[in-house]
Image (cartoon, coloured by chain):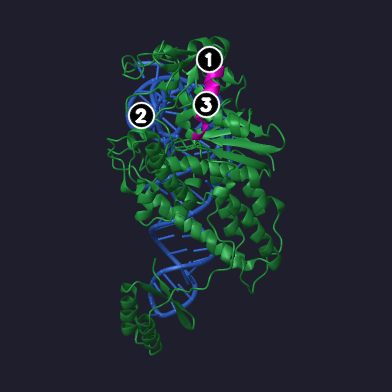
Chain colours: A green, B blue
RNA sequence: GGUGUCUUAGCCAAGUGGUUAGGCAACGGUCUGCAAAACCGUGAACGCCGGUUCGAAUCCGGCAGACACCUCCA
């Protein structure tokens, strides 16, 4: 099926086709591994996952997905420094080798990050590669040399800067976002980090080392500039090295449009001479209870904290997919609860597809109502999960599983396999046997109650039922028996 | 300060000129000794003020509020 995507460059929805070889090459800006990723980060990665799984399963393209791990920046350096309060015993002993400390520090959070996204249903096998910035230092240096040689970079006090002014004369700087540089807020740009630039708009390609920081030697213009790469370098370099330019789609949070992505374009163009990719796709932010997530408001959540509160990560996944990726998503606990119920409703429907039913009266569904047509039709237009889901729920209520012919049930099982290749939150299988062990004590009380019911001793029956409820179980009566269920 | 986005029922969330989005909750019904579950059904909305139009949630203007970028946050 043809896929259409909103492109941040053109600000409209466009038909998507890969540039070459019938393979989609996609690069997603990954996390900086200095702390537990928060649920706002998670939304970005869920969006990237939705993108890749839709392109594969609905678009039916082969796909190479790359997501970087930023393991060198101010925050990771600070966290791994000798004075760091963020150093944890689990990271091992700090050594005199600062680079090794950085590695140990970032590896710790990288591992947790990969665990987190897997809990959210992201499959690591779907990645072509998850490269680390520090594994591409010499390649980044090579790109800086190219940019320098082409005249778009200058050295100042041991750092290398990109000359935005000069680049703007040859190229459009501001493709993703129009920035009016004359109207920058006055006064706030003067900080310790920016004084040595020629122009406040210039950004750093290579940052000279400070005392106590890990660094790499860098030969440029016949002098050695020990230091480390600027933030934007890693993406430009790894895209080129791993996917090749141009590649197809670049994803990331909307906040990265400027300066990060704008600077990436400038670097690739100024160094490699190639516009890196035609499709830029950005997800909107997540808010918590209607407010920006922030530590001071106490609404700053990592995935782990939410799981500790007893939330199911797949309910969180579903809750986020119930909103469109280009709108702000308001994360609330009530919202996750609603998503959990809605998810279960679909799951129950799927279970029923595997059951025999006495009524098989529905044996035909009009094409324009048939689930795969309505559902994937919506997904294919800019990954519109909320619309697609509304079609799904409509279908479920119009065509109850218990009335479908066996043939339709079998067809639908395959449809749900495909739907689930994107949503990844359901089991496409018969309902598992209730194999939770019910304690004998509960069984006894339940049996007593059943007897009391037979005797029409309602008072006793109700008493025994509330006793069972208090013990964490519930009784589901049926016509001539009952079932015991453990409460969640 | 500049620029941009957004404001839809109790909650979440689609909808860009006329036709039921959807989910959760609520309410009513069927079933049941009563509940629960399940199933069926119901109501309720477009931030405020003005304008354009036969007709506005949708287009235009103003106001209020929220958010974002400009400042290495996804």
User: Where, quadrant-wise, is the C terminus of chain A in this rendering?
Assistant: bottom left
* Residue depicted at 62% across the width and 57% down the height: A416
Question: Disc 2 marks which residue?
Answer: A213
The chain under label 1 reads A
Residues drawn in magenta: A135-146
Residue A117 seen in the current view: yes
Residue A144 belongs to the span the image colors magenta = yes
Q: Nearer the viewer, residue A22 or A383?
A: A22
Task: Report the front residue among A367 and A487.
Answer: A487
Residue A339, image x, y percentages: 46, 53
Write down the residue under mark 1. Answer: A148
Residue at the image point whose x is 61% and y is 23% from the top: A275
At horizontal 29% and vertical 35% (from top left) the residue drawn is A82
Is residue B57 positioned above or below A332 on the image? above
Please state the horizontal and vertical placement of residue A377, each as a whole percent of the image. Answer: 65, 45
Q: Which residue is mark 3?
A: A140
Q: Residues within 10 Å of mark 3 (few under 14, many from 20)?
A: many
Residue A339 in sight in this render:
no
Q: Earlier in the sequence, mark 1 or mark 2?
A: 1
Which element type, helix, strand or loop, lies under badge 3? helix
Q: How far, Cα to Cα, is label 1 from label 2?
A: 25 Å
Report the chain holding disc 3.
Answer: A
């Amino acid at each position: 099926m043809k896929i259409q995507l909103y492109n941040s460059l053109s600000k409209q929805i466009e038909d998507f086709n890969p540039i070459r070889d019938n393979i989609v090459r996609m690069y997603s800006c990954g996390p900086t591994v200095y702390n537990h990723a928060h649920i706002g980060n998670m939304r970005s990665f869920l969006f990237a996952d939705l993108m890749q799984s839709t392109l594969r399963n609905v678009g039916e393209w082969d796909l190479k997905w790359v997501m970087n791990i930023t393991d060198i920046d101010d925050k990771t350096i600070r966290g791994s420094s000798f004075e760091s309060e963020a150093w944890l015993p689990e990271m091992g002993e700090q050594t005199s080798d600062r680079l090794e400390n950085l590695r140990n520090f970032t590896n710790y959070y990288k591992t947790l990050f990969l665990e987190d996204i897997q809990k959210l249903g992201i499959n690591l096998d779907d990645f072509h590669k998850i490269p680390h910035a520090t594994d591409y230092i010499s390649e980044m240096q090579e790109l800086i040399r190219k940019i320098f040689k082409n005249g778009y970079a200058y050295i100042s006090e041991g750092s290398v800067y990109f000359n935005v002014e000069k680049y703007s004369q040859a190229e459009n700087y501001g493709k993703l976002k129009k920035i009016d540089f004359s109207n920058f807020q006055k006064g706030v740009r003067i900080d310790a980090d920016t004084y040595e630039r020629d122009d406040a708009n210039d950004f750093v390609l290579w940052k000279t080392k400070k005392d106590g920081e890990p660094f790499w030697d860098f030969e440029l213009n016949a002098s050695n500039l020990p230091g480390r790469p600027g933030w934007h370098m890693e993406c430009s370099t790894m895209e080129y090295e791993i996917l090749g330019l141009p590649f197809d789609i670049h994803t990331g949070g909307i906040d990265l449009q400027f300066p990060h992505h704008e600077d990436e374009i400038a670097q690739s163009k100024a160094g490699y001479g190639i516009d890196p990719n035609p499709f830029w796709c950005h997800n909107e932010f997540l808010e918590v209870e209607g407010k920006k997530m922030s530590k001071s408001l106490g609404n700053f959540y990592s995935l782990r904290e939410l799981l500790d509160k007893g939330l199911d990560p797949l309910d969180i996944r579903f809750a986020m997919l119930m909103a469109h990726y280009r709108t702000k998503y308001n994360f609330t606990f009530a919202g996750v609860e609603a998503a959990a119920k809605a998810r279960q409703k679909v799951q129950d429907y799927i279970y029923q597809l595997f059951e025999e039913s006495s009524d098989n009266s529905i044996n035909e569904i009009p094409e324009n109502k048939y689930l795969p047509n309505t559902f994937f039709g919506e997904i294919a237009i800019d990954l519109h999960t909320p619309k697609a889901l509304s079609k799904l729920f409509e279908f479920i209520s119009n065509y109850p599983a218990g009335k479908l012919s066996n043939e339709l049930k079998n067809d639908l099982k395959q449809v749900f396999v495909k739907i689930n290749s994107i949503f990844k939150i359901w089991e496409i299988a018969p309902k598992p046997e209730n194999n939770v062990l019910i304690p004998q004590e509960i069984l006894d009380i339940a049996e007593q109650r059943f007897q009391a019911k037979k005797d029409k001793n309602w008072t006793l029956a109700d008493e025994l039922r509330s006793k069972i409820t208090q013990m964490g179980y519930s009784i589901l009566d049926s016509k001539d028996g009952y079932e015991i269920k453990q409460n969640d």
